[in-house]
């Protein structure tokens, strides 16, 4: 080819090209749509966190139940210990009281025997007797204030938890195993036996004879 200049477009081609360029310029260019990230990893992470929290809650509940059970057991043990200590203290107090009163009761017995045997005739003897009676009454009143009370045993059925049978003898007036006579007075202390009563017990109707000593 020779260096000829390019041919000029015809008027029709020029008009078509101008319209196409104008349409292209008037059409807005849409930006590319970005792809949305997948939601599956986030949902999976949420599910794992929920499972972890549920497991932690279950563990905390189990720990709470264990601690509560231990607390209840310790509280029960302490309450039992407190009651046992209180009971032991009360028993010790009663034992000490019984021991002390046991030393006093023979003095009461001596007053009882003196009161029954003395029969004062002179004015001086009667004054002395009244003095002894006053001391005896004071002693009995003190024992009452301490919770000591005498047993009433004559005519009662023999009870080994209250009585100590020293003698047994036939009796037409009393049935078998009935207390005939009180030989040494017994005492209660707040419902407990402070000292057993020494008694003579009926064997029921039978041949007359000497009293038979009680044999264990």
Image (cartoon, rainbow, N blue to C red):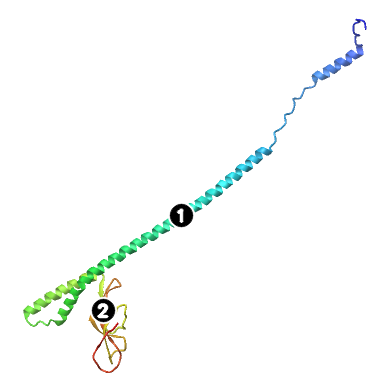
Query: Which residue is labeled 1 in the image?
Result: 70
User: Along the polypeptide, which appears first: circle 2 or circle 1?
Assistant: 1
Residue 59 position, x and y percent, is: 54, 49
- Whether residue 124 is situated above or below residue 212 in the rendered picture: above
Residue 142 on image: x %, y %: 21, 70
Tell which residue pokes out farthest to the top in this image: 3
27 or 53: nearer the eye?
53
Residue 20 in which image quadrant: top right
Distance in Å between CA atoms under marks 2 and 1: 52 Å
Residue 197, numbered label:
2
**Rendered view: 108 above or below 170:** above
Residue 184 appears at what percent x and percent y?
Answer: 22, 79
**Snapshot quadrant of residue 76:** bottom left
Q: In the shown orientation, is residue 14 left or right of residue 137? A: right
Q: Residue at x 11, y 77 (%)?
A: 129
**The C terminus lies in quadrant:** bottom left
């Amino acid at each position: 080819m020779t260096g000829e200049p390019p041919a000029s477009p015809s008027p029709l081609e020029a008009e078509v090209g101008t319209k196409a360029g104008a349409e292209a310029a008037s059409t807005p260019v849409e930006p590319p749509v970005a792809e949305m990230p997948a939601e599956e990893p986030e949902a999976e992470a949420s599910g794992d966190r929920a499972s972890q929290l549920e497991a932690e809650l279950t563990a905390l509940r189990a720990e709470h139940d264990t601690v509560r059970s231990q607390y209840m057991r310790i509280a029960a043990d302490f309450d039992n210990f407190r009651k046992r200590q209180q009971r032991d203290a009360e028993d010790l107090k009663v034992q000490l009281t019984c021991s002390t009163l046991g030393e006093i009761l023979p003095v009461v017995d001596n007053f009882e025997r003196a009161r029954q045997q003395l029969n004062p005739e002179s004015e001086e003897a009667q004054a002395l007797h009244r003095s002894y009676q006053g001391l005896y009454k004071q002693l009995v009143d003190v024992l009452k204030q301490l919770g000591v009370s005498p047993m009433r045993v004559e005519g009662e059925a023999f009870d080994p938890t209250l009585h100590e049978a020293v003698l047994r003898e036939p009796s037409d007036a009393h049935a078998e195993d009935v207390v005939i006579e009180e030989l040494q007075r017994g005492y209660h202390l707040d419902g407990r036996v402070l000292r057993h009563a020494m008694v003579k017990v009926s064997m029921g109707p039978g041949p007359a004879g000497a009293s038979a000593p009680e044999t264990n």
